[in-house]
């Protein structure tokens, strides 16, 4: 048994001696070679929020390769660009860079990586070509020294290269709103907006259309939003007229609205300008109040309620009509009244025929009232509901003396009637 084990060990040793010698491949004389180029379009327009895509490539190659026995294998290749960081700056270009430096990581030989940068092209950018400096920073294995059979010293070098990226600014129409004049723009109503705009760009627009666009959730809602203006040359001015509606949820304040121009450029392409946002003041909703004070009435009576209304809004309420909601203990056979046109601050009196139940409890009551009117565009509008204050007073109590006199008078009348009847009957007999 012992001889058998010795034979096994002998064959294993012989096998080890016949295995091929393993070598280590070493690359010398190489380094990364970085290049960069735009990916996608290189044409941008003034005022544009542009995303610039850049492709970074490592085209480094190894100059010398050899294989040795008994050396330590290298962890890195000299042509690998490690810890690559890329940053783009404005230089002299009319651009604002919004992105931070981009970290790519390692790029091996013949490797490619694409990154993006968010930028803003200045609205007054002139036509032409501009270069954006792209700085690429990385480290690579410059050399390796093996001082002994089990020690390897790697020497890394950091490199920073600046590569030019060329972009082109195309001419474009750029609008500038010179004047915005609102007409009858009030909460819950329709009105008009008149604009005067200028082409402050470096392009002549053809077949141009000026569009008014709602800004996000703004309560200014264009009813008709496109005006055809035809040719729109540089430095030219045009006027446009729009009908807009104001949401009833709005308040009395200034709200945004966007203006763009769609046109045909020199290449025959349809282009839309960068939106110009402007603020439009909106007046408050027309409202009314009661200036005649509390209406006084006796229980169990009927008569005319005179109520004075005042327009406390900012514009004229045309063809105003009022309505009074009569509820118990009140009844009305005529609960509407016509006030006519009411200018801001103007007053008018409404008259209602109202009766009060005999069982009404003396006290103060409030009756709902509202005003229906027409706005400047002849649209029917209704005011918010408000109150008319009515005080019901008890009838004056009758005194005891007056009651006794009344009873005696009644008895006397009955007696006179009876005596007259008896006298007539006797004469007939």
Image (cartoon, helix red, strand yellow):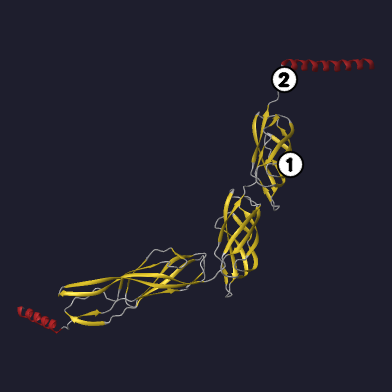
Residue 291 sits in quarter: top right
Tell which circle, 2 or 1, labels the residue nearer the N-terminal end: 1
Which secondary structure, mark 2?
loop
Residue extending farthest left: 2
Q: Are marks 2 and 1 in contact (CB under 8 Å)?
A: no
Mark 2 vs mark 1, foreground winner is: 1
The local crowd at label 2, few if under 14, some if 14 to 19, many if 20 or more residues have their Cα within 10 Å, is few
Q: Residue at x 41, y 64 (%)?
A: 99
Residue beneath disc 1? 337
Q: Quadrant of the C terminus?
A: top right
Q: From the viewer's side, name the closer residue of 35 and 162.
A: 162
Query: Rounded to the nearest whole Å, what is the CA distance between mark 2 and mark 1?
Result: 37 Å
Q: Position of residue 307 (x, y in %)?
A: 70, 36
Where residue 385 sits: x, y (%)? 64, 42
The residue carrying mark 2 is 398
In the rendered structure, the answer to whether residue 118 lies left or right of residue 343 reads left
């Amino acid at each position: 048994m012992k001889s058998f084990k010795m034979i096994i060990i002998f064959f294993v040793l012989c096998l080890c001696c016949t295995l091929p010698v393993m070598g280590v491949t070493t690359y010398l004389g190489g380094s990364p070679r970085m290049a960069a180029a735009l990916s996608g379009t290189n044409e941008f327009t003034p005022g544009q929020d542009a995303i610039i895509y850049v492709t970074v490539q490592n085209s480094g190659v190894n100059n010398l390769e050899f294989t040795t026995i008994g050396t330590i294998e290298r962890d890195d290749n000299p042509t690998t660009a490690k810890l690559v960081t890329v940053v783009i700056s404005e230089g002299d270009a009319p651009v604002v860079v919004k992105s931070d430096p981009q970290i790519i990581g390692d790029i091996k030989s013949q490797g490619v990586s694409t990154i993006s940068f968010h930028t803003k092209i200045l609205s007054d950018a002139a036509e032409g070509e501009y270069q954006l400096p792209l700085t690429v920073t990385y480290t690579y294995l410059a050399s390796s020294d093996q001082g002994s059979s089990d020690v390897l010293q790697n020497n890394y070098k950091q490199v920073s290269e600046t590569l030019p990226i060329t972009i082109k600014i195309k001419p474009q129409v750029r609008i500038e709103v010179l004047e915005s004049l609102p007409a009858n723009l009030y909460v819950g109503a329709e009105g008009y907006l008149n604009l005067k705009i200028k082409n402050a760009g470096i392009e002549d627009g053809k077949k141009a259309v000026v569009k008014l666009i709602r800004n996000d959730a703004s309560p200014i809602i264009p009813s008709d939003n496109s005006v055809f203006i035809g040719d729109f040359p540089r430095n030219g001015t045009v006027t446009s007229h729009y009908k807009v509606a104001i949401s009833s949820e709005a308040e009395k304040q200034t709200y945004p609205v966007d203006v763009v121009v769609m046109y045909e450029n020199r290449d025959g392409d349809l282009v839309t300008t960068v939106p110009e946002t402007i603020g439009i003041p909106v007046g408050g909703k027309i409202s009314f109040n009661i200036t005649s004070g509390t209406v006084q009435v006796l229980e169990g009576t009927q008569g005319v309620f005179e109520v004075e209304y005042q327009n406390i809004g900012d514009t004229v309420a045309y063809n105003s009509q009022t309505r009074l909601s009569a509820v118990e203990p009140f009844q009305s056979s005529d609960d509407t009244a016509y006030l006519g046109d009411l200018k801001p601050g103007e007053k008018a009196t409404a008259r209602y025929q109202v009766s009060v139940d005999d069982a009404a409890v003396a006290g103060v009551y409030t009756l709902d009232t509202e005003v229906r009117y027409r706005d400047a565009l002849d649209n029917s509008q209704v005011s918010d509901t408000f109150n008319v204050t009515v005080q019901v007073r008890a009838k004056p109590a009758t005194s005891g003396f007056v009651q006794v006199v009344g009873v005696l008078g009644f008895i006397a009348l009955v007696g006179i009637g009876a005596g007259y009847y008896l006298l007539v009957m006797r004469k007939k007999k």
